[in-house]
Image (tube, rainbow, N blue to C red):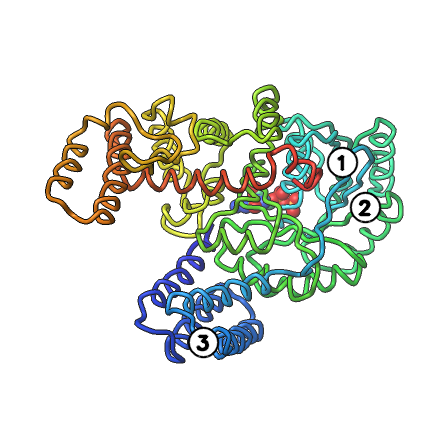
Amino acid sequence: MVLTSLGRRINSAFADLSRAPQVDDATIEALLKSVCSALLESDVNVRLVSELRNSVRAEVKEGLNDKSKSSLQDGQRKALVQKAVFDHLVKLVDPTPGQEQWKPTKGKPNVVMFVGLQGSGKTTSVTKLGHHYAKRGFKVGLVCADTFRAGAFDQLKQNASKANIPFYGSYTETDPVVIAKQGVDSFKKNRFEVIIVDTSGRHRQEAELFEEMVEIADAVKPDMTIMVLDASIGQAAEEQSKAFKEAAGYGGIFVTKLDGHAKGGGAISAVAATHTPILYLGLGEHIADLEIFRPAPFISKLLGQGDLTGLMDKMEEVRTQNPERQKELMKKLEEGGKFTVRDWKEQLGNIMGMGPLSKIAGMIPGMGAMLGGGGGEGDEAANGKMKRMMYICDSMTKEELDSDGSLFYTPVGGKGKGKAKGKEASSSKSKQVAKVDEEGKSKEKKKAKQVKVRMTARARRVAQGSGTSVREVEEFLMQYRMVSKMVQSMGGLARFKQQTSGAG
Ligand code: GDP
């Protein structure tokens, strides 16, 4: 997405901070200057940027002057500054701090009504949302109550058929309220769980748009009303989201076209400033280009640090596509089994089949950075990177794949679990270790060297076999560890599913 350049600029400001010899007022001001000018270029409102600057400055000063933290090392002081910037960026895009996001509930009809200006991406987003919940096991139906635009019903019909989602509409009825009511009633009668109503758009925001919204809402009593906002309007999103909030009382926003517009940061922060919940993001024209909006993971992905929650959402989608295999994995994890390198390989394979890869790759910690920014650097780059990850897996032995990766770090002759055996024991590197022994170096030095040798030997073998580099193998293992930690700490995908049932 175009926001990548914003992420890249903030990251480069962080890199300057890391290189600075010390953390003083000048370094902090330089960092703030770079971060703020990057935000302004993303069309974030000047007032919001200035507030962010003042809050970060105050928090950092307080943190660094705190007597209990006076013994902080330079690295810790830098981390404190980075964390303050991160936290305030999250605040900037968080419309409802501490509040739980709306999500449909399983087993009951959830009526969702869409409104928005013509061309904002409303019909596309209706299908995306339908597809999203259908993939997660909800019974979904779409209602076309857009009688304003010629061809609207055909468009929805075509999209819905492609996504294999039942739809309702009429070529003859001209009253949108009647169609909406009939469609919702019919889906309710047939026990549909997510019923999405697409309403007419207008060329510009006008009273008529909101009047019709209120009439249809009175007829179908939606559980959620969603306004679709095109990210390219940048700061102007504030006015639209305010008007919508006043007319709808309560509702959520779907920000579209974030893949194509540098002003995306401006649109999101402008909506956030009105405290209207942002529920979903549209990141492309493809039906799967939808993301649930979560402030902290959004910023994390923007900065190339991955979005594990988003990745878990995607894995959940795989679960429904491939139920037997995923069930086995869940059972194992529930029973306290390990999420092994092989499990990660399998998930990667599944994810690769889901496309669009550039968006998924950015969710894997470190991948965004590797692709050169805050994720989403094009499907080709992501595809290439993920293929290399698969080659790395293919070059691992059965023992390595079934491990938790720790045997890559086992020292020669060490007592750690998964002690390495086989080829490496007779490798030239092992001979070098023996030589180190002969030279009578100190015990500590010897140990350090041995650890390094063993890790490099195994990783080098895998790198050679897969046509990658040792560094890539280590990066792969680092990513696997982060994902595994998350999966394991959540007690497995099944428990994760229970926690988020309906959210993802
Ligand atoms: P509507 O008039 O509001 O119903 O808008 P449409 O759903 O017909 O979308 C208008 C155009 O925007 C179409 O060309 C869509 O493919 C495109 N579009 C919708 N959402 C996105 C998005 O998230 N990213 C991009 N790049 N294009 C989108």
Displayed-image quarter of ligand 1: top right
Q: Which residue appears at 43% of the width and 25% of the height?
A: 402
SS state under label 1: strand
* Quadrant for the C terminus in the image: top right
**In the visual, does 144 lie left or right of 307?**
right
> Which residue is disc 1 drawn over?
194
Q: Which residue is mark 3?
A: 70
Residue tagged 2:
223
Q: How many marks?
A: 3
Q: Secondary structure at mark 3?
A: loop
Q: Which numbered circle lies on residue 66? A: none
Q: Amino acid at mark 3?
A: Ser
N-terminal-most mark, 2 or 1: 1
Residue at the spot x=29%, y=25% of the render? 421
Q: Nearer the viewer, mark 1 or mark 3?
A: 3
Pick the front one: 365 or 52: 365
Three-letter code for the amino acid on which mark 2 is drawn: Asp
Do the residues under discs 1 and 3 have CB atoms within 8 angstroms? no
Up/down of 209 relative to 410, above or below: below
Q: Nearer the viewer, residue 69 or 232?
A: 69
C-alpha distance separating marks 1 and 3: 55 Å
Position in image of residue 228 (x %, y %):
67, 51
